């Protein structure tokens, strides 16, 4: 079993969308544990609304590609559209940050909010 770390983010109806994504993730990965949410802002003209961010950890023996496929399926089911990103609207964004010992998204992993939320997962 591999330890899996994912990040969730939303800036449109963020509380409702994060809560919905959490329920959907728990359906696929029953042992998933979530951090509390943190509110962050992006300093650019495109993202006008603050983000709600959450980390989650679970264990799986599925290949990384299969996990990513499920994450993208959840995003699609929640209505994420490619054009929304161009407009700065993020209904839901779910990224696979870590698979086992491999950090798959190093830039995201080093973000301040990820590092802050990781402290909540120590020992999970």
Image (cartoon, rainbow, N blue to C red):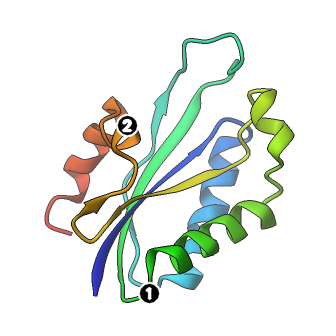
Label 1–label 2 contact, CB within 8 A: no
| Residue displayed at 63% across by 46% down | 15
> What is the quadrant of residue 82 in the picture?
top right
Compared with residue 23, is residue 19 higher up or lower down, i.e. above or below? Answer: above
Specify whether 52 is left or right of 37: right
Cα distance in 3D space between marks 1 and 2: 24 Å
Give the vertical position of 2 relative to 57 (above or below): below
Residue 23 appears in the rendering: no
Give the quadrant of the N terminus: bottom left
Q: Quadrant of residue 32?
A: bottom left
The quadrant in which the C terminus is found is: bottom left
Which percent across, then down, holds residue 69? 62, 73
Dot 1 alpha-carbon crowd within 10 angstroms: few under 14, some 14 to 19, many 20 or more: few
For label 2, the residue is 107
Q: Residue at x 57, y 33 (%)?
A: 51
Image disc number at residue 8 = none
Mark 2 neighbour density, 10 Å: few (under 14) some (14–19) many (20 or more):
few
Q: Toward the viewer: 16 or 112?
A: 112
The percent position of residue 116, horizontal first and vertical second, equals 27, 38
> Dot 1 corresponds to which residue?
62
- Which residue of the protein is positioned furthest toward the left in this rendering? 123
Residue drawn where x is 67% and y is 65% of the image: 72
Splitting the image into 4 quarters, where does residue 42 fall? top right
Above or below, 92 relative to 84: below
Examine the rendering and report whether any part of residue 22 can be seen: yes
Q: Is residue 119 left or right of residue 86?
A: left
Q: Secondary structure at mark 1?
A: loop
């Amino acid at each position: 079993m591999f330890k899996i770390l994912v990040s969730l983010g939303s800036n449109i109806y963020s509380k409702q969308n994060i809560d919905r994504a959490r329920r959907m993730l728990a359906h696929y990965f029953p042992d998933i544990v979530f951090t509390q949410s943190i509110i962050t802002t992006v300093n650019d003209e495109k993202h006008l609304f603050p983000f709600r961010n959450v980390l989650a950890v679970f264990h799986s023996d599925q290949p990384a590609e299969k996990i990513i496929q499920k994450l993208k399926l959840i995003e699609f089911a929640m209505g994420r559209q490619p054009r929304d990103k161009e407009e700065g609207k993020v209904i839901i964004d779910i990224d696979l940050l870590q698979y086992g010992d491999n950090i798959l998204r190093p830039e995201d992993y080093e973000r301040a909010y990820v590092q802050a939320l990781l402290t909540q997962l120590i020992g999970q």
